[in-house]
C-alpha cells in the first residue's frame, strides 16, 4: 500500500488508529500490538501477498537467532549464532536482490549462459534486513533487554517505516511501544502528525511526481537532449529524489506521531550542505548512522591510522552504493561519493579556507552529477546525459518538458490570467522556483513540526494540501526508494 | 492546551471530509464519464475519450443499436444508421481496440440494455491472428469498468475528472446545451488529407520487413483463431439470438494488400478471412459483409488517409450497403467471393501503384 493512495488515507489509516487506541483503551495492550502487527502485514501484503511469506520468515528467523543468542550461555557460542544470523540476513538479501546481477556479470565475464532467476524484489527488503542485522548484533553485544515476540515483530513490521525507512533501531521503537503513557490518543501528537503528513504528501505528490515527469521524459529522449535540457533534467532529478524520499519520510514520521511514536529524523536540508561529509550527515541520516555503527566502526573506524580510515570510509560508500541497487551504476555512484568524501577529509584544511559559498556550490554540483549515475538505467545512458550537458549545444527547449508537467489545475488557473501567453515557460519556471525555495529557503519538515501551532493558518494549509493531493492520486505514482 | 489541538484535529477531519464529499459529489452529479447515470439536460458533455466514456455510454444511454469496432468505425454517423434502419444508436469505437476489448464493451451493453436489437461491428483483418486475450493498454481505468464501488475513489476524487465536470457545466452556462453529437464523437474524417501522397507519407513500401513467407496457416494459428473467434465474437452472438449482428470486415486499401504481400503474409490473410467468414456465417442473427470486391473503394487511394483508414464517406457507403444487402456474404456465395478476392489480389500488379 502506498501512503499516497485512497485506500491508505481513507480507510487503512483511520481504521488502524481507531483500532489501536480502542484496544489500548480497554487495556488490551498485547492485543493492540498484535492488531498493529496484523495491520502492518495487510499494508505490506497489499503490494503482493507472496511478499508476506518472506517478511514473516525473516522476522521469525531473526527472533529465533535472538533467542539463541540469549540462551547460548557462552560468549563464543553467542558470537557463532550472531555471525550465522548476519550471514542468513545477508544471504537473503543477496539472493533476492543481487542474484541476477551476479549471474549477468558471470555470464559477461566467462561467456556462460546461466539463466536469470528473475526474482521480483520484495519491497523494503534492504530496510528490514538492515534493521534486523542491527538487532541481532546488539543482542550479541548485550544491549537488548528481554523483548517479547509481538514487540519484536511489531518493531520490524511497523508499517510507517517498513518499506522505505527511516531505518529505526529497536531501542528507539520498542521502549515507546512499552510506554503506557503513549498508548492513548494525544491530540497534540495527532495534530502534528496530520500536519507533517500533509506536508510530506504534498512534497511527494505535487512536487516530486511533477519533476519525475520531466526526468522520465528527458531520460526517454536522450538523443534529442541539448545542454540546457540536460542541465534541467539533472537538476529536476536532484529535486525529485529529495522531495520523493524526504516526503515519504515526513509522512512516516507524521504517521508515527499519530501513534505517539517518534521516528528518527532522516533528512536535514541536505542540499544546504557545504561539504560532502556534511551532506552525508544530512541525507538519509539513519542509513549513515547504520553504516557508521555496523560497518565503519567494526572495520576499525579512524582508530588505525589515516590510510585505514580512508579505506574504511571508501568501503562504506562502496557498500552503500551496492545496497542502493544491484547494478554497476549504483556501485559507481557509491565510488564517486566515497572518493569525494576521502578527498574532502584528506584536504580538510584546504577546504576550510575556501569560501563557504564556493564549497556549497562544488558540493551541490557534485551531488547533481552523481545522481545522474543513480537515475540512469545504464552507465551508457548516464554518460550520454553528461555528454549532452558538456556538448554546449543549444537547440531551444523542447516544448514537451513543459507539456509533461502541465496539470489541469495549472492550465485552468493560468488560463484565467493568461499568464502563459505573456510568459510561455511560466509553469516550468514556477515549478523550479517553488522547489528551489523549498530546498534552500524553507525550514525542514521536522522543524516545522516542532514549531507547529494549532491555528487557522496551519488548518487551512493542511486541509488544502490534503484535498489537493488526494485529488491528484488517480495518476500512476511509485516511490523511488522502494527498490533499494 | 489539549482542547486547542483537539479542536484543530476535528476541524481538519471535518473540513477534509466536507471537501471530499462536496467535490466528489459534484463529480458524481455531473458524471462526465456517465459512470452513474446518463447525460443531464443542463450539462454540455464532451464526448472525446473512448476508453473513459464508452463504458458509461453503453450502460446509461438510451439506445437500441450500437456501432462498435476499432478506429475504422470512428467516422460513422449514428444519425445515418438511425435513419436507414429506424433505430436509436450509439457509437462506441475503441481506437486500436482488440477483439477482446470491443467484445467486453458489447457484453456490458448487452448486460445493461435489454432494448438492444442491432449491433454494427467492424472486424479488422490485422487482428485475425491476435491472441484471444490481447489488450493493448496498460493504464486502463479499471474503476470505470467493474461493478465495485470500492475503487470509485479514483473517479470521484480525481482532479482531471473534476475539472472536466466543471467544464461541462461551464460549457452549458456559456453556450447552452449544444453538446457534441454521436456523429461528431471522435470523428476525424475532415481533419486529414487523403490520397496516394497521404498514404505514402505514412507507408514506405521498400521498408517493409519480410517475415517468413508461407501460403498456409499452421494448426497452432487455426487454434488461436478459433479461441479468439469463439471468446470475442461468436459466444455473444450465440447467446443473444434476439440481437441482429451486422458484422463487416474493414475494407483496407490496396496498399495494405501490398504491405501484406511484401511482408509475405498476403495469402495467409486471405485464408484467415475465409476462416472467419466460415465461422460467422452459420449464425442466423449475423449479417456478414466484406467489401474487398468493391474495387472502386479499395483500389482508389483518394478514399484513404493511410493504408487502412478510410474517410467518413466510406463509412456512409458501408451503411448503405448494409441496408441494401450489397456485398453481403451467404453460405451460397462466400466461396465464389473468396476465390474472386484470391485471384484478384494475388495477381494484382502492385508495382503499378507506385508509377
Image: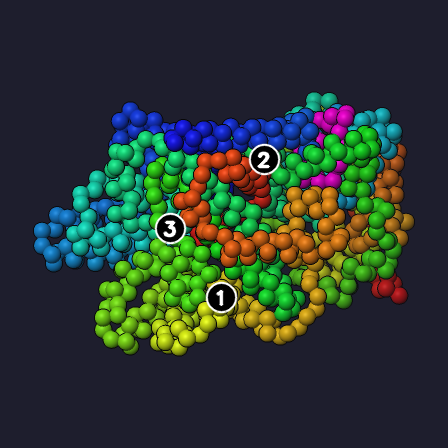
User: In this picture, is A113 found above or below A407?
Assistant: below
Image check: A102 left or right of B331? left
Q: Residue drawn 35% across and 65% down?
A: A319
Q: In front: A450, or A241?
A: A450
Q: Chain of mark 3?
A: A
Report crowding for label 3: few under 14, some 14 to 19, many 20 or more residues within 10 A (C-alpha): many
Furthest residue in direction right, as rendered: B296
Task: Determine whether the residue tagged by mark 3 lies in a helix, strand or loop.
Answer: loop
Quadrant position of residue B72:
top right
Q: Chain of mark 2?
A: B
Furthest residue in direction front, as rendered: B1
Secondary structure mostly seen in magenta is: loop
Do marks 3 and 1 share a subunit? yes
Marking on residue A364: 1
Is B355 in the magenta? no
Magenta span of residues? B38-57
Q: CA distance from mark 2 to mark 3?
A: 32 Å
The N terminus of chain A lies in quadrant = top left
Q: In front: B270, or A315?
A: A315
Residue where numbered disc 3 is placed: A265
Residue where numbered disc 2 is placed: B157
Task: Determine whether the residue tagged by mark 1 lies in a helix, strand or loop.
Answer: helix
Report crowding for label 1: few under 14, some 14 to 19, many 20 or more residues within 10 A (C-alpha): many
Q: Residue drawn 32% across and 69% down?
A: A313
Q: Residue drawn 77% across and 41% down?
A: B186
Quadrant position of residue B317:
top right
Of callouts 3 and 1, which one flags the residue occurring earlier in the amino acid sequence?
3
Can residue B35 be seen by looking at this rendering?
no
User: In this picture, is A210 found above or below B89?
Assistant: below
Q: Nearer the viewer, mark 2 or mark 3?
A: 3
Q: CA distance from mark 2 to mark 1?
A: 38 Å
Amino acid at each position: 500500500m502506498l501512503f499516497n493512495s485512497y485506500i491508505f488515507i481513507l480507510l487503512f489509516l483511520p481504521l488502524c488508529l481507531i483500532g489501536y487506541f480502542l484496544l489500548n483503551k480497554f487495556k488490551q495492550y498485547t492485543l493492540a500490538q498484535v492488531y498493529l502487527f496484523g495491520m502492518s502485514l495487510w499494508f505490506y501484503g497489499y503490494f503482493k501477498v507472496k511478499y508476506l511469506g518472506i517478511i514473516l520468515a525473516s522476522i521469525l528467523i531473526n527472533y529465533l537467532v535472538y533467542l539463541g543468542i540469549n540462551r547460548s550461555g557462552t560468549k563464543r557460542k553467542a558470537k557463532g549464532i550472531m555471525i550465522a544470523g548476519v550471514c542468513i540476513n545477508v544471504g537473503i538479501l543477496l539472493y533476492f536482490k543481487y542474484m541476477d546481477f551476479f549471474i549477468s556479470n558471470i555470464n559477461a565475464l566467462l561467456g556462460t549462459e546461466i539463466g536469470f532467476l528473475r526474482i521480483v524484489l520484495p519491497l523494503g527488503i534492504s530496510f528490514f534486513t538492515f534493521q534486523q542485522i542491527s538487532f541481532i548484533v546488539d543482542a550479541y553485544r548485550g544491549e537488548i533487554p528481554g523483548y517479547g515476540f509481538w514487540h519484536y515483530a511489531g518493531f520490524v513490521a511497523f508499517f510507517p517505516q517498513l518499506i522505505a525507512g527511516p531505518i529505526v533501531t529497536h531501542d528507539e521503537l520498542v521502549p515507546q511501544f512499552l510506554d503506557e503513557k503513549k498508548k492513548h490518543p494525544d491530540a497534540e501528537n495527532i495534530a502534528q502528525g496530520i500536519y507533517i503528513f500533509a506536508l510530506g504528501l504534498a512534497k511527494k505528490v505535487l512536487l516530486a511526481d511533477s519533476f519525475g515527469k520531466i526526468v522520465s521524459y528527458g531520460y526517454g529522449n536522450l538523443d534529442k537532449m541539448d545542454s540546457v535540457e540536460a542541465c534541467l533534467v539533472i537538476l529536476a532529478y536532484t529535486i525529485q529524489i529529495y522531495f520523493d524520499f524526504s516526503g515519504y519520510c515526513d509522512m512516516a514520521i507524521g504517521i508515527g506521531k499519530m501513534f505517539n511514536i517518534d521516528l528518527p529524523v532522516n533528512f536535514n536540508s541536505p542540499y544546504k550542505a557545504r561539504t560532502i561529509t556534511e551532506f552525508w550527515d544530512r541525507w538519509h541520516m539513519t542509513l549513515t548512522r547504520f553504516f557508521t555503527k555496523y560497518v565503519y566502526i567494526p572495520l576499525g573506524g579512524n582508530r588505525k591510522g589515516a590510510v585505514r580510515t580512508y579505506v574504511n570510509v571508501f568501503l562504506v560508500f562502496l557498500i552503500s552504493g551496492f545496497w542502493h541497487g544491484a547494478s554497476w551504476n549504483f556501485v559507481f555512484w557509491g565510488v564517486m561519493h566515497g572518493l569525494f568524501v576521502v578527498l574532502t577529509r584528506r584536504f580538510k584544511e584546504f577546504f576550510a579556507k575556501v569560501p563557504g559559498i564556493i564549497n556549497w556550490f562544488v558540493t551541490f554540483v557534485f551531488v547533481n552529477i552523481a545522481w545522474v549515475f543513480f537515475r540512469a538505467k545504464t552507465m551508457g545512458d548516464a554518460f550520454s546525459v553528461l555528454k549532452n550537458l558538456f556538448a554546449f549545444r543549444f537547440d531551444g527547449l523542447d516544448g514537451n518538458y513543459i507539456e509533461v508537467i502541465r496539470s489541469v489545475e495549472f492550465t485552468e488557473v493560468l488560463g484565467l490570467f493568461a499568464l502563459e501567453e505573456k510568459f510561455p515557460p511560466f509553469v516550468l519556471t514556477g515549478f523550479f522556483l517553488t522547489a528551489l525555495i523549498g530546498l534552500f529557503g524553507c525550514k525542514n519538515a521536522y522543524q516545522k513540526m516542532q514549531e507547529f501551532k494549532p491555528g487557522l493558518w496551519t488548518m487551512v494549509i493542511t486541509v488544502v494540501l490534503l484535498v489537493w493531493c488526494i485529488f491528484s492520486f488517480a495518476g500512476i505514482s511509485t516511490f523511488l526508494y522502494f527498490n533499494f | 492546551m489539549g482542547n486547542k489541538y483537539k479542536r484543530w484535529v476535528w476541524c481538519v477531519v471535518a473540513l477534509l471530509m466536507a471537501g471530499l464529499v462536496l467535490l466528489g459529489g459534484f463529480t458524481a452529479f455531473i458524471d462526465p464519464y456517465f459512470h452513474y447515470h446518463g447525460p443531464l439536460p443542463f450539462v454540455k458533455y464532451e464526448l472525446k475519450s473512448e476508453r473513459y466514456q464508452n463504458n458509461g455510454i453503453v450502460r446509461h444511454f438510451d439506445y437500441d443499436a450500437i456501432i462498435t469496432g476499432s478506429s475504422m468505425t470512428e467516422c460513422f454517423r449514428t444519425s445515418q444508421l438511425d435513419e436507414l434502419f429506424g433505430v436509436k444508436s450509439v457509437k462506441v469505437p475503441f481506437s486500436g481496440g482488440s477483439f477482446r476489448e470491443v467484445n467486453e464493451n458489447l457484453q456490458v451493453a448487452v448486460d445493461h440494455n435489454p432494448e438492444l436489437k442491432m449491433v454494427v461491428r467492424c472486424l479488422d483483418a490485422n487482428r485475425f491472428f491476435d491472441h484471444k486475450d490481447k489488450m493493448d493498454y496498460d493504464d486502463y481505468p479499471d474503476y470505470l469498468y467493474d461493478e465495485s464501488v470500492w475503487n470509485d475513489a479514483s473517479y470521484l476524487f480525481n482532479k482531471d475528472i473534476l475539472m472536466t465536470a466543471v467544464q461541462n457545466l461551464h460549457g452549458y452556462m456559456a453556450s447552452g446545451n449544444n453538446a457534441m453529437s454521436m456523429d461528431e464523437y471522435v470523428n476525424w474524417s475532415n481533419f486529414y488529407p487523403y490520397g496516394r501522397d497521404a498514404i505514402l507519407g505514412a507507408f514506405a513500401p521498400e521498408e517493409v520487413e519480410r517475415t517468413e513467407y508461407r501460403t498456409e496457416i499452421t494448426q497452432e494459428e487455426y487454434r488461436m483463431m478459433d479461441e479468439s473467434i469463439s471468446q470475442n465474437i461468436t459466444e455473444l452472438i450465440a447467446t443473444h439470438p434476439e440481437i441482429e449482428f451486422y458484422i463487416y470486415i474493414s475494407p483496407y486499401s490496396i496498399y495494405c494488400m501490398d504491405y501484406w504481400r511484401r511482408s509475405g503474409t498476403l495469402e495467409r490473410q486471405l485464408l484467415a478471412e475465409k476462416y472467419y467468414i466460415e465461422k460467422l456465417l452459420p449464425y442466423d442473427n449475423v449479417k456478414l459483409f466484406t467489401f474487398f470486391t468493391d474495387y472502386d473503394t479499395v483500389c482508389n487511394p483518394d478514399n484513404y488517409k493511410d493504408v487502412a483508414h478510410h474517410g467518413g464517406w466510406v463509412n456512409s457507403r458501408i451503411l448503405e450497403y448494409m441496408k441494401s444487402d450489397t456485398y453481403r456474404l451467404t453460405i451460397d456465395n462466400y466461396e465464389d467471393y473468396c476465390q474472386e478476392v484470391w485471384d484478384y489480389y494475388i495477381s494484382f500488379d502492385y508495382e503499378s501503384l507506385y508509377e
